[in-house]
Image: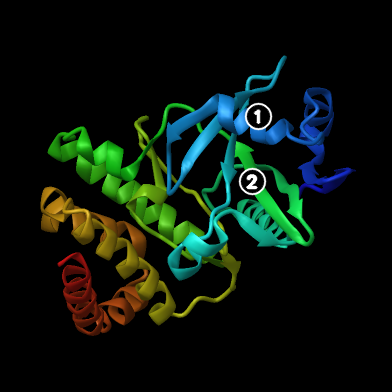
Amino acid sequence: MPEFRLLSAGRVRLSVHEGFLEDIQRLGWAEAGALEAVLLEEGGAATGRLPLAVASLPGRRERIALRRLVHGGLLGPLLGRAYLGTGRATREIEVTAELRAAGAPVPLPVLAGGERIFGAWWALTVGTVFEEDTRDGLAWLAASPEPDALLRVARAAGRAVRAFHDAGGRHADLHIKNLLVRDTTPPEVLLIDLDRARMTPGLTPGERMTQIMRLFRSLLKREVLPGIGTRGIAAFFGAYCGDDRALRRALLRRVDRELRKVALHALRYRKSQN
């Protein structure tokens, strides 16, 4: 697993993957205002939950995807991008590195940290290697893929989520835009946006099913589930379970309970929209 080196200069504090340390130093990203300038200049790629800035590294093939952390939920309008300390961003890249080392299909983490806004409050940024030639799951579905291609990607997604769970990953917000699809042969799927993700080895079938149904709800909420259909769902589920019949039975026992939760969630969502 890679080591991360601390770069600190005045109001800026960055933890940087040792393999990218010289590049980040050469670009001056540890200087005040440097990352903010990159985010403003290079921003715009719609991948995952928030827009990304995709920046080149001179002399290297890899590009870096920079994502600004922003509060969601009830605290979002109040706190915006202000966080107490830099721990949340640092934890994200450390967990990402652990998951990747354990075989989870996640991007390579490059840096995390931020710039002090005032007092103990910081604006945080996370950087990973940008996954070229990918689209988030929603954008991929919006392109109206052929039925055979859809089934292949559904299976790839099932295998990817299974590998993530087997590595001990618990995603805090597993939804369709947090799956990246690379249309190769065979297709590849990666999981992104690991803010608040955790390493919890030995996930129970119930914990796994809760995550899978969160993904299912995102398909329902974004009204793309009919395009996937029962065959696509079966392809995902079959690939997730593989030859593990005990896991398949354990997950199927939870389907009715989880579908009731989905119905309740959909009702609450419709009420909030009225």
Q: Residue at image x 76%, y 32%? A: 29
Q: Is residue 243 visible?
A: no
From the viewer's perspective, is residue 226 above or below residue 51?
Answer: below
Out of 178 and 164, give the one closest to the viewer.
178
Identify the residue shown where x is 86% and y is 47%: 6
Residue 124 relative to residue 25: left or right:
left
Number of other residues with Cα within 10 Å of mark 2, as a class: few under 14, some 14 to 19, many 20 or more: many
Q: Quadrant of residue 251?
A: bottom left
Q: What's the residue type where badge 2 is placed?
A: Val
- Residue carrying label 2: 126
Confirm or deny contact between disc 1 and disc 2 (CB under 8 A): no
Position of residue 28 relative to residue 94, above or below, is above
Residue 7: % across, % down? 86, 42
* Label located before the other in sequence (1 or 2): 1
State how far apart marks 1 and 2 are (Cα): 15 Å
Callout 1: helix, strand or loop?
Answer: helix
Q: Position of residue 202 (x, y in %)?
A: 55, 76
For the point 62% across and 51% down, the residue is 100
> What quarter of the picture does the C terminus occupy?
bottom left
Q: Nearer the viewer, mark 1 or mark 2?
A: 1
Q: Which residue is mark 1?
A: 37
